[in-house]
C-alpha cells in the first residue's frame, strides 16, 4: 500500500476518530468534566485504602490517560504543527517560570468549535478550537491554560480524595467504566457518570468551588511570573459572561464546569492589580494562530489576518498561485513573522520554486534553531520533491538533539523511510510513534519486527533490543 509522504498539516483535521461520533464533543467534555466530581462522591460504605499519594498518582494518571484516549478516538483533533507548537510553548513558558518543569503536560487540540478546555490527572490537557477563536487576547487564552495548569499543580483531585479520608474506589471504577463504555455506548457512559453524581454532598461541592478560586489565583500568579498580563483572566471571564448572555439557553461548555459570576470577575480584576504591570502579549503570533485555527475548522476570518487565512485556504485547495496572490496582501508586520514565512515557503515549494522555499526555511532555522515547525515543514517539502532520505535525515538530525512530544514527528519519519525503501527504519520509527502515544503493545510489535531485520550484534540491534525491553516492561506494568 502506498503511503503518502504528506502528513495532515495542511488538511488540518486528524482522522484518528475510527467511527463517526455518536455524541458531540461538547456532550463528552461536559460529562467527563463532571466525571471527576465522582472523586468527591460519598461511597457510603467501608472501602479499602489505596495507599500513599504515589499510588494515587499512578491510578489517577491511568484514568486521565484512558479518558483522553477515548476522547481522541471518537472526536477529531487538529494535528497542526504550528498551532500545537504555539499552545505547547505557552504551557512550557508557564511551567518554566513557576518551577513546574517536573509536571509533564500532554496537550491535545480538538477541532471542535466549542468554547472549552479541561485538565485530567496525569498532566493531560485538552484545548478546543473554539477557545482559541473566542479569546480576545493572548493573555486571555493563556489565562485558561494557567487555570488548568493550576488544577494539576495544586493537586485538586488528590486533595478531594484526601478530604474524604479514603479513596473512593467505586467512583474511580465508575470513571474507568465510563471512559471505556464511551467507545461503544455513549448513552450508557453518561448514565454511568451521572449515577455517581447523585451521591456527591454539598460540602464537597463547596470544596470544589474553593478549588476554582484557588486555581484562579494561582493561574494569575503563574501568568504574571511568566510575563503575561494577569488582567487576561478577568478579560476572559468578562468575554465568557457576555457570550453566555448572547447564547442563553445554549450555555457555553466551559461555564458548565467553571461558572463565571460577577463576584468572580471582580475578584479577577482585583487580584490582577496586585501583580506586575509589565506583562505583554505576542499580538502577531496570537492573531496568526487564531486565523490558522479558524481556517482549519472552517470559521470566518474578517480582521487584518484575512490574507493569511485566504492564502492557507488556497494552498489547501492546491491553488498555489492564488495563495501567493493572497499572501502579498498581508501587512508588513504580519508578513515578517516566522509563521507567515513558513506559509510563504510552502507556497514557493508548491509553485515549484524548491530552492527559494529551502532558502526561506534555512533563514528561519538560523534565527530559530530549536523551533520544530521549521524542521517539520522542511522535511515535508523535501519529501514532496521525492527527496525522501534527505527529508528523513533532516528530521532525524533534529530528534537527535531534541526530545519531541509531538508524535507526528516519529510517524512522519517512518513515512519518509518507507518511501525511501528502508523497511528497518520504517518499523523502528513507527515503534517510536506508538511509544510516544503510550501504546506499548503496538510499539513493542514494531520494535520486534525492526529487530528481526537488524544485523545481529550491531549497534542498531542493541538499541532496538533496549527499546523493545523497555516497551515490553511498560506494557506489562499497565496490563489490567
Image (cartoon, grey):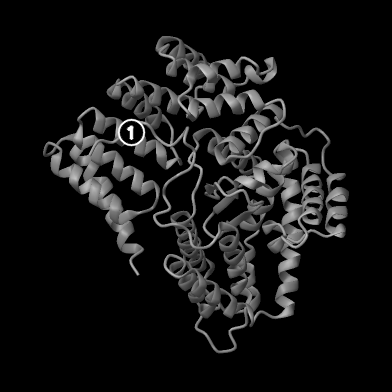
The percent position of residue 194, horizontal first and vertical second, equals 59, 76
* Rendering coords of residue 49 (x, y %): 51, 79
Figure quadrant of residue 355: top left
Q: What residue do we see at 60% from left, 19% from top?
A: 326
Q: Nearer the viewer, residue 206 or 382?
A: 382
The residue lying at 30 percent from left, 42 percent from top is 430
Task: Quickly name the residue at label 1.
Answer: 413
Q: Relative to 149, is 195 above or below?
A: below
Q: Residue at x 67, y 51 (%)?
A: 115
Split into 4 quadrants, where in the image is the N terminus? top left
Q: Return the residue found at the far bottom.
A: 45
- Residue 42: % across, % down: 62, 82
Residue 408 seen anywhere in this rendered image of the structure = yes
Q: Is residue 211 above or below residue 273?
A: below
Q: Which of 162 and 299 is in front in this view?
A: 299
The image quadrant of residue 29 is bottom right
Report the side of 284 relative to 382 (left or right): right
**Neighbourhood count class around disc 1 (C-alpha, 10 Å): few under 14, some 14–19, many 20 upward:** many
Please tell me which residue is depicted at 33% across the width and 33% down the height of the picture.
413
Q: Is residue 235 left or right of residue 458?
A: right
Q: Where is residue 343 in the image (x, y as percent from the top left)?
A: 53, 22
Query: Relative to 142, is 381 on the left or the right?
Result: left
Q: Residue furthest left?
A: 456
Instruction: Name the quarter where the C terminus is drawn.
Output: bottom left
Looking at the rendered structure, the number of numbered marks drawn on it comes to 1
For the question of whether residue 51 can be seen, the reply is no
Asked where in the image residue 138 lies, by quadrant, the reply is top right
Q: What kind of element bears circle 1?
A: helix
Which residue is nearer to you in this view: 132 or 21? Answer: 21
Amino acid at each position: 500500500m502506498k503511503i503518502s509522504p504528506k502528513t495532515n498539516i495542511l488538511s488540518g483535521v486528524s482522522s484518528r476518530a475510527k467511527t463517526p461520533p455518536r455524541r458531540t464533543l461538547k456532550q463528552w467534555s461536559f460529562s467527563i468534566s463532571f466525571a471527576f466530581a465522582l472523586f468527591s462522591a460519598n461511597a457510603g460504605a467501608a472501602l479499602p485504602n489505596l495507599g500513599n499519594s504515589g499510588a494515587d498518582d499512578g491510578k489517577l494518571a491511568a484514568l486521565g490517560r484512558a479518558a483522553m484516549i477515548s476522547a481522541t478516538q471518537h472526536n477529531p483533533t487538529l494535528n497542526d504543527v504550528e498551532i500545537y507548537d504555539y499552545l505547547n510553548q505557552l504551557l512550557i513558558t508557564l511551567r518554566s517560570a513557576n518551577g513546574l518543569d517536573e509536571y509533564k503536560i500532554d496537550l491535545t487540540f480538538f477541532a471542535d468549535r466549542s468554547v472549552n478546555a479541561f485538565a485530567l490527572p496525569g498532566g493531560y490537557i485538552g484545548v478546543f478550537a473554539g477557545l482559541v477563536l473566542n479569546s480576545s487576547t493572548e493573555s486571555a487564552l493563556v489565562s485558561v491554560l494557567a487555570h488548568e495548569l493550576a488544577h494539576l499543580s495544586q493537586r485538586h483531585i488528590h486533595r478531594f480524595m484526601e478530604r474524604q479520608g479514603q479513596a473512593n474506589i467505586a467512583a474511580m471504577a465508575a470513571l474507568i467504566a465510563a471512559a471505556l463504555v464511551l467507545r461503544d455506548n455513549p448513552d450508557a457512559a453518561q448514565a454511568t457518570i451521572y449515577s455517581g453524581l447523585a451521591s456527591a454532598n454539598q460540602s464537597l461541592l463547596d470544596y470544589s468551588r474553593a478549588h476554582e478560586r484557588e486555581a484562579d489565583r494561582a493561574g494569575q500568579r503563574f501568568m504574571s511570573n511568566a510575563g503575561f498580563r494577569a488582567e487576561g483572566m478577568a478579560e476572559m471571564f468578562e468575554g465568557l459572561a457576555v457570550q453566555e448572555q448572547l447564547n442563553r439557553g445554549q450555555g457555553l461548555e466551559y461555564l458548565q464546569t467553571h461558572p463565571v459570576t460577577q463576584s468572580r470577575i471582580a475578584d479577577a480584576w482585583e487580584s490582577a492589580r496586585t501583580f506586575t504591570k509589565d506583562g505583554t502579549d505576542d499580538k502577531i503570533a496570537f492573531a496568526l494562530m487564531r486565523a490558522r485555527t479558524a481556517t482549519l475548522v472552517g470559521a470566518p476570518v474578517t480582521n487584518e489576518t484575512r490574507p493569511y487565512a485566504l492564502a492557507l485556504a488556497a494552498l489547501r485547495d492546491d491553488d498555489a498561485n492564488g495563495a501567493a496572490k493572497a499572501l502579498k496582501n498581508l501587512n508588513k508586520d504580519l508578513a515578517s513573522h516566522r509563521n507567515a514565512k513558513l506559509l510563504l515557503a510552502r507556497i514557493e515549494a508548491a509553485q515549484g520554486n524548491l530552492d527559494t522555499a529551502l532558502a526561506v526555511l534555512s533563514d528561519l532555522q538560523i534565527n530559530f534553531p530549536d523551533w520544530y515547525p521549521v524542521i517539520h515543514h522542511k522535511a515535508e517539502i523535501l519529501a514532496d520533491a521525492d527527496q525522501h532520505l534527505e527529508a528523513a535525515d533532516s528530521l532525524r538530525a533534529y530528534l537527535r538533539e531534541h526530545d519531541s512530544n509531538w508524535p507526528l514527528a516519529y510517524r512522519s519519519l517512518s513515512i519518509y523511510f518507507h518511501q525511501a525503501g528502508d523497511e528497518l527504519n520504517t518499523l523502528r520509527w513507527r515503534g517510536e510513534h506508538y511509544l510516544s502515544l503510550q501504546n506499548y503493545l503496538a510499539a513493542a510489535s514494531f520494535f520486534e519486527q525492526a529487530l528481526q531485520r537488524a544485523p545481529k550484534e550491531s549497534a542498531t540491534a542493541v538499541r532496538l533490543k533496549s527499546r523493545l525491553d523497555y516497551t515490553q516492561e511498560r506494557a506489562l506494568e499497565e496490563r489490567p
